[in-house]
Image (cartoon, helix red, strand yellow):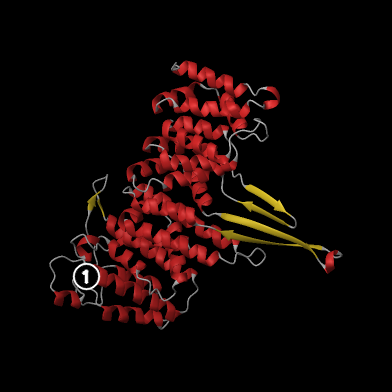
Amino acid sequence: MTLTVDQAAGKIHQLVGDEGFLGTSRNDNMQSVRKLLGQFGPADEDKIVAKLSDADLKKLAGNVNHGGIFGAQGLDGGEKKDLFNGLARGLDGKQLGRVAAAFSDRSDVTALGDSVASFASSQAKIDFVKSLAPAATSGDTKFDTSWGTSSIQTGDKEAIAISHVLSSMKNDPAGFATAVKSLDADQLQAVVKAGEGQTVITTSSMTDGGLGAASATTTSTFDTAGLQSLLGAASACNDPIAKARVFEAGTKALDDIHGADTLLTPSPGAKDSAKAVAGGLTKLMNSDTRGIVNRLDTDDPFGHALTTYLKQQLGDDPKASNPAIGRQVAMLQGAGTGKTADQFYNTAEVGSNGDHFYRNAQNLGYYAGAMQAAIGKLKADAKTQGDILSNVFSTAISVGTAAMPGLSVAAKVGAQAFSGLTKEAVREIVGGVSADDGSLSNALMDLAVPHAPGQLDRTRGPADPFFLSASNAVSGANP
C-alpha cells in the first residue's frame, strides 16, 4: 500500500526514534528510510522532509553516522552518499539546508554540498546557498593530531559546501549571479577563504635527543583548486556586479597566501599558489574588463583590490612581457567598441543632475591609478618601471589597433588609428621614467589618455578631470 505524505513522515519519525534492543534495529531502520524516500517523487519527498522536525533530522543524522556491529551500525559511506544524492535530487534548497544543519559533521556538510552541486536544480542550489550562508562565517576548522604533528585545515565547512555549489553553476550564469549576490561581503569572503585550501602544520620535537627543550615549526600549504573553480564560474557569468564582487574577494586571497609565508611560519609553495590565483583573476578580469572595473570603482572606490591584483601580476613578471595588463588597458581605452580611444574616452553621459559624466575616462583613470600604486609597491628601479610601461602600452596599441574595424593593413601597421600613439612615441614618453628623471604619474596619463595621431602631446578636454580624480584617489590610497 502506498503511503501518503503524512503517513510517510510519521513512519520516518518512528524509524529514527526506534533503535531496537541495544540499537540492533538501527541499520534496518535506516535502510527503510532510504527505501521509503525513494518511493516518492521530488515534490512529495520535499514535503515529507518539511514535515519532519529538526529533532527528527538530528536523530536521522545520528543514526546514519552511528558505529557498531550486528545491526547497530548506521549506513556505510556509499549508502550515505546515495542518501545525499537522492535528497539533492528531490529537496528544495531550504530543506537541503535543514539537512546540512542536522548532519553537522564537517565531512557530511561538504559531502552534501557535493551532492547538491551534482544533482540539485538551479533554484535549489541558489536557495541552498542562501540557507547555509549565515553559518559560513563561524570560522570552524578541522584539527588533526598525530605523534609530534598537528594540522589545522582552515575554511568553514558551510563555506566549502557553498564554494562547491557555486563552482558547479558555471553553465548557469544567471543562477550563479543570483547566488553570489545573495551573499554579504563577509559570507563571500568566507567562501573565498575556504577555496584557498590552507592547511597549517605544526611539528614539535625535543632537542638533544629528547633531553633538551621542546621546539616547534609551523608551515602552511595551499590547495587553491577550489578558488580557481569559483573564479572560473565567475568568468562565465554575464553579470558585472557578481563578477566584480568575486574579483574583489578573490584578491584578498593573495594577501592571505603571502601573509602566511613569513620567516617564522614559512609556506614553501606560497608563490606558486598566489601566481595560480592571479591567473584565475586574470581570466575573470579579461572576461569583462570594462564591466568589472566600472563596478569596482563603485564597490572599492580606492582601488585596493585592483592594486593588489596588479602588484601580483607585475611582481610575477617584472618586465610585464605578459600581455594581460596591456590587453586590459586596451579594453578600457575602448578596444572592440568600434570607436577610437579618443572617441571612447570622451564619450559623455548625462548624470542625475544634468551634468556631463565621463565614465570611460574615470574607469581608465581608476585602472591607471592602481597600476601606478602597484608599480610603486614593487620598489622597482627606474629602468624596470620604464620596461613595464613600454611593454604594457605597446601591447595596448597592438590590441586596440587590431580591433579597429575596416582598417587596411597599412593603417594597422601605422598603429595610430586607435589611440593616436605609436610604439616609437611610447618609447619617447617612457624614456624619462627609465632615466629616473620623469614622473611615473605623468607618464601613465600621457600613455593612457588618447593622442592626436602621431603626436607626443595627449589631447585635452572635459573628460580629463574624471581621469585625474580617479587616478589620484587610487594611487594616493595605496602608497
At numbered mark 1, what does the secondary structure look like: helix, strand or loop? Answer: helix
The relative height of residue 2 versus residue 119 in the rendered view (above or below) is above
Number of numbered callouts drawn: 1
Residue at image x 36%, y 65%?
368
Residue 393 horizontal/vertical position (percent): 32, 72
Find residue 351 and report its horizontal and vertical position in percent.
26, 48
How many neighbours does mark 1 have within 10 angstroms: few (below 14), some (14-19), or many (20 or more)?
A: many
Please give the name of the residue rendered at 57% of the width and 28% of the height, measured from the top-left corner: 30
Which residue is depicted at the point 77% across and 62% down?
205
Residue furthest toward the right? 211
- Residue linked to disc 1: 401
Depth check, front residue: 62 or 210: 62
Q: Is residue 279 visible?
A: yes
Camera sees residue 300? no
Apparent side of residue 134 relative to residue 353 in the rendered image (left or right): right
Looking at the image, residue 392 lies above or below residue 104: below
Q: Position of residue 343 (x, y in %)?
A: 19, 62
Residue 154 in percent (x, y) is at: 59, 50
Choose top left, top right, bottom left or bottom right for residue 293: bottom left
Q: Nearer the viewer, residue 300 or 63?
A: 63
Q: Amino acid at mark 1?
A: Thr
